[in-house]
Image (cartoon, helix red, strand yellow):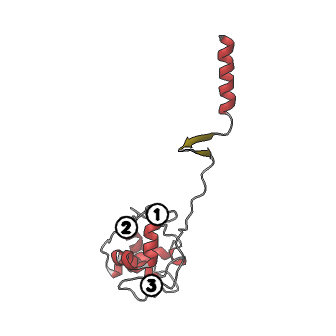
Amino acid sequence: MKNWITLLSLTLLITSCGEKKEVKKEGGFEINRTKKEAAPKEVSEGVPVDLSNKGIGPVTTVEFGDEIDKDLAAQGEAKFNAICVACHLVDQRMIGPAMEGVYERRSPEWVMNMILNPDGMLKEDPIAKALLKEYNNAIMLNQNLTEEEARAVAEYLRTL
Protein backbone atom coordinates (compact mmCIF):
# COMPACT_ATOMS: atom_id res chain seq x y z
CA MET A 1 0.00 0.00 0.00
CA LYS A 2 2.83 2.40 0.91
CA ASN A 3 4.58 1.69 -2.43
CA TRP A 4 1.35 2.31 -4.31
CA ILE A 5 0.90 5.77 -2.69
CA THR A 6 4.54 6.65 -3.36
CA LEU A 7 4.21 5.57 -6.98
CA LEU A 8 1.00 7.59 -7.40
CA SER A 9 2.59 10.68 -5.81
CA LEU A 10 5.66 10.38 -8.01
CA THR A 11 3.50 10.00 -11.15
CA LEU A 12 1.44 13.08 -10.25
CA LEU A 13 4.58 15.09 -9.57
CA ILE A 14 6.15 14.16 -12.92
CA THR A 15 3.00 14.85 -14.96
CA SER A 16 2.33 18.17 -13.22
CA CYS A 17 5.78 19.48 -14.18
CA GLY A 18 5.11 19.14 -17.90
CA GLU A 19 3.37 21.57 -20.26
CA LYS A 20 -0.33 21.89 -19.47
CA LYS A 21 -2.51 20.65 -22.28
CA GLU A 22 -6.23 20.46 -22.25
CA VAL A 23 -8.01 18.15 -24.64
CA LYS A 24 -11.73 18.47 -24.71
CA LYS A 25 -14.21 16.70 -26.94
CA GLU A 26 -17.35 18.63 -27.80
CA GLY A 27 -19.96 17.52 -30.29
CA GLY A 28 -17.62 15.16 -32.15
CA PHE A 29 -14.78 17.70 -32.38
CA GLU A 30 -11.56 17.58 -30.44
CA ILE A 31 -10.32 20.85 -29.02
CA ASN A 32 -6.64 20.82 -28.12
CA ARG A 33 -5.42 23.80 -26.12
CA THR A 34 -1.91 24.45 -24.95
CA LYS A 35 -1.37 27.04 -22.24
CA LYS A 36 0.90 29.80 -23.55
CA GLU A 37 2.08 33.14 -22.33
CA ALA A 38 -0.32 35.98 -23.05
CA ALA A 39 0.34 37.71 -26.34
CA PRO A 40 1.29 41.39 -26.14
CA LYS A 41 -1.68 43.72 -26.27
CA GLU A 42 -2.47 45.22 -29.64
CA VAL A 43 -2.84 48.97 -29.64
CA SER A 44 -4.13 49.17 -33.14
CA GLU A 45 -7.65 48.27 -34.07
CA GLY A 46 -8.80 46.24 -37.03
CA VAL A 47 -10.38 49.34 -38.57
CA PRO A 48 -8.62 50.93 -41.56
CA VAL A 49 -6.64 54.14 -41.17
CA ASP A 50 -8.29 57.06 -42.98
CA LEU A 51 -6.90 60.54 -42.52
CA SER A 52 -9.07 62.07 -45.26
CA ASN A 53 -12.40 61.29 -43.56
CA LYS A 54 -13.60 64.36 -41.64
CA GLY A 55 -16.63 62.67 -40.13
CA ILE A 56 -20.21 63.84 -39.71
CA GLY A 57 -20.79 66.90 -37.56
CA PRO A 58 -20.19 70.59 -37.08
CA VAL A 59 -16.39 70.58 -37.50
CA THR A 60 -15.14 70.97 -41.06
CA THR A 61 -11.61 72.22 -40.39
CA VAL A 62 -9.22 72.09 -37.45
CA GLU A 63 -6.04 74.12 -37.48
CA PHE A 64 -3.29 72.77 -35.24
CA GLY A 65 -0.40 75.15 -34.63
CA ASP A 66 3.19 74.01 -34.98
CA GLU A 67 3.55 74.07 -31.20
CA ILE A 68 1.14 72.49 -28.74
CA ASP A 69 -0.89 75.06 -26.78
CA LYS A 70 0.02 73.94 -23.26
CA ASP A 71 -2.82 75.80 -21.53
CA LEU A 72 -5.42 74.41 -23.92
CA ALA A 73 -3.91 70.91 -23.62
CA ALA A 74 -4.07 71.15 -19.81
CA GLN A 75 -7.78 72.04 -20.03
CA GLY A 76 -8.28 69.12 -22.39
CA GLU A 77 -6.41 66.75 -20.09
CA ALA A 78 -8.64 67.74 -17.17
CA LYS A 79 -11.76 67.16 -19.29
CA PHE A 80 -10.38 63.84 -20.61
CA ASN A 81 -9.60 62.65 -17.07
CA ALA A 82 -13.06 63.69 -15.90
CA ILE A 83 -15.17 61.99 -18.58
CA CYS A 84 -13.19 60.02 -21.16
CA VAL A 85 -11.15 57.66 -18.96
CA ALA A 86 -14.30 55.71 -18.14
CA CYS A 87 -13.97 54.14 -21.60
CA HIS A 88 -10.58 55.18 -23.04
CA LEU A 89 -7.04 54.60 -21.82
CA VAL A 90 -4.07 56.36 -23.29
CA ASP A 91 -1.98 53.39 -24.38
CA GLN A 92 -4.29 50.37 -24.53
CA ARG A 93 -7.76 49.54 -25.71
CA MET A 94 -10.49 49.27 -23.15
CA ILE A 95 -14.19 49.78 -23.82
CA GLY A 96 -13.07 52.17 -26.54
CA PRO A 97 -9.84 52.57 -28.53
CA ALA A 98 -6.52 53.70 -27.06
CA MET A 99 -6.00 57.41 -27.62
CA GLU A 100 -2.23 57.40 -28.08
CA GLY A 101 -1.41 58.10 -31.72
CA VAL A 102 -5.04 58.80 -32.65
CA TYR A 103 -3.97 61.42 -35.22
CA GLU A 104 -1.95 58.75 -37.03
CA ARG A 105 -5.27 56.94 -37.64
CA ARG A 106 -7.91 59.70 -37.80
CA SER A 107 -8.10 63.31 -38.93
CA PRO A 108 -8.48 66.01 -36.26
CA GLU A 109 -11.88 66.91 -37.74
CA TRP A 110 -13.03 63.28 -37.43
CA VAL A 111 -11.89 63.16 -33.79
CA MET A 112 -13.70 66.36 -32.89
CA ASN A 113 -16.86 65.29 -34.73
CA MET A 114 -16.79 61.97 -32.88
CA ILE A 115 -16.52 63.87 -29.58
CA LEU A 116 -19.27 66.34 -30.48
CA ASN A 117 -21.62 64.14 -32.52
CA PRO A 118 -21.16 60.47 -31.60
CA ASP A 119 -24.80 59.61 -32.38
CA GLY A 120 -24.63 60.97 -35.92
CA MET A 121 -21.19 59.49 -36.50
CA LEU A 122 -22.31 56.02 -35.38
CA LYS A 123 -25.30 56.19 -37.72
CA GLU A 124 -23.59 57.57 -40.84
CA ASP A 125 -19.79 57.43 -40.72
CA PRO A 126 -18.25 54.18 -42.05
CA ILE A 127 -15.24 54.29 -39.71
CA ALA A 128 -17.39 54.98 -36.64
CA LYS A 129 -19.61 52.04 -37.67
CA ALA A 130 -16.56 49.79 -38.05
CA LEU A 131 -15.26 50.88 -34.64
CA LEU A 132 -18.66 50.15 -33.11
CA LYS A 133 -18.46 46.62 -34.48
CA GLU A 134 -14.79 46.24 -33.43
CA TYR A 135 -15.65 47.26 -29.86
CA ASN A 136 -18.61 44.89 -29.40
CA ASN A 137 -21.31 47.50 -30.07
CA ALA A 138 -20.23 49.64 -27.13
CA ILE A 139 -21.59 53.01 -28.18
CA MET A 140 -19.85 56.26 -27.40
CA LEU A 141 -22.16 58.42 -25.36
CA ASN A 142 -22.66 62.07 -26.15
CA GLN A 143 -20.96 64.01 -23.35
CA ASN A 144 -22.55 67.28 -24.56
CA LEU A 145 -19.23 69.10 -24.76
CA THR A 146 -18.99 72.50 -26.33
CA GLU A 147 -16.85 72.94 -29.43
CA GLU A 148 -14.25 74.74 -27.27
CA GLU A 149 -14.12 71.83 -24.79
CA ALA A 150 -13.79 69.34 -27.64
CA ARG A 151 -10.98 71.44 -29.14
CA ALA A 152 -9.19 71.37 -25.76
CA VAL A 153 -9.48 67.56 -25.64
CA ALA A 154 -8.21 67.41 -29.24
CA GLU A 155 -5.19 69.50 -28.23
CA TYR A 156 -4.51 67.20 -25.27
CA LEU A 157 -4.63 64.16 -27.58
CA ARG A 158 -1.77 65.74 -29.55
CA THR A 159 0.45 65.36 -26.47
CA LEU A 160 0.01 61.59 -26.25
Q: Amino acid at mark 2?
A: Ile
Identify which residue, 86 or 96, lies in the foreground. 96
| Quadrant of the frame with the N terminus | top right
Residue 90 x/y as whole percent: 49, 65
Kindly identify which numbered label has been placed on residue 139: 2
Residue 70 x/y as whole percent: 45, 77
Sooner in the amino-acid sequence: mark 3 or mark 2: 3
Q: Amino acid at mark 1?
A: Leu
Q: Amino acid at mark 3?
A: Lys
Sooner in the amino-acid sequence: mark 2 or mark 1: 1
Work out which residue is located at the far front of the displayed protein and give it.
Answer: 28
Q: For the point 46% across and 70% down, which residue is it?
A: 131
Q: For the point 67% across and 31% down, which residue is it?
A: 15
Q: Is disc 3 surrounded by few (<14), some (14 to 19) or many (20+) residues within 10 Å?
A: many
Q: Is disc 1 surrounded by few (<14), some (14 to 19) or many (20+) residues within 10 Å?
A: some
Kindly identify which numbered label has been placed on residue 54: 3
